[in-house]
Image: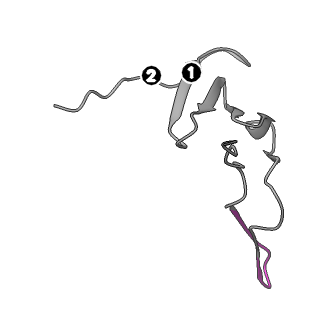
Amino acid sequence: MTVRQREYGRKWRVLAHTPDKSIEVEDEGVFDELVVDDWLHVEQMDDDVWCLRVGDARLMVTLDPNGHASVDVERGFYAEPRGSTQTHTPE
């Protein structure tokens, strides 16, 4: 029996505003890339790998077959780090 891998990026939504109206696009195809100015970039790199730029940080997100994300974060990848970095550990 062949197990079909889940197709990630099918469920998404983008909302933007003009002075006169709101523009919303939802679930139109498979999401691939979003770029906002030069500080936010989200792009699907492979079937289960996503790369995000948020300011100076690069986040690499890998999804397992159940859709659970593993996230690796590199600060200072795109620019000098600005802001703080913390790890929250639930009690």
Location of residue 70 in the rendering, given as x and y in whole percent from the top left corner: 52, 28
Mark 1 lies on a secondary structure that is strand
- The vertical placement of 7 against 24, above or below, is above
Q: Is 86 in the magenta?
A: no
Q: Which residue is drawn at 38% across and 23% down?
A: 86
Q: In the picture, residue 63 is in which quadrant?
A: top right
Q: Which badge, 2 or 1, is on the more N-terminal residue? A: 1
What residue is disc 1 on?
A: 73
Q: Residues within 10 Å of mark 1 (few under 14, many from 20)?
A: some
- What range of the chain is rendered magenta? 13-23
Q: In which quarter of the image is the C terminus?
A: top left
Q: Quadrant of the N terminus?
A: top right
Q: Residue at x 74, y 19 (%)?
A: 78
Furthest toward the left, the residue is 91
Task: Inspect the image, locate mark 1, and give the three-letter code of the amino acid beneath it.
Answer: Val
Q: Is 21 in the magenta?
A: yes
Mark 2 lies on a secondary structure that is loop
Location of residue 15 in the rendering, given as x and y in whole percent from the top left corner: 71, 68
Cβ atoms under marks 2 and 1 closer than 8 Å: yes
Location of residue 32 in the rendering, given as x and y in whole percent from the top left corner: 82, 47
Q: Residue at x 82, y 67 (%)?
A: 28
Numbered circle sitting on residue 85:
2
Task: Inspect the image, locate mark 2, and give the three-letter code of the amino acid beneath it.
Answer: Thr
Location of residue 60 in the rendering, given as x and y in whole percent from the top left corner: 64, 26
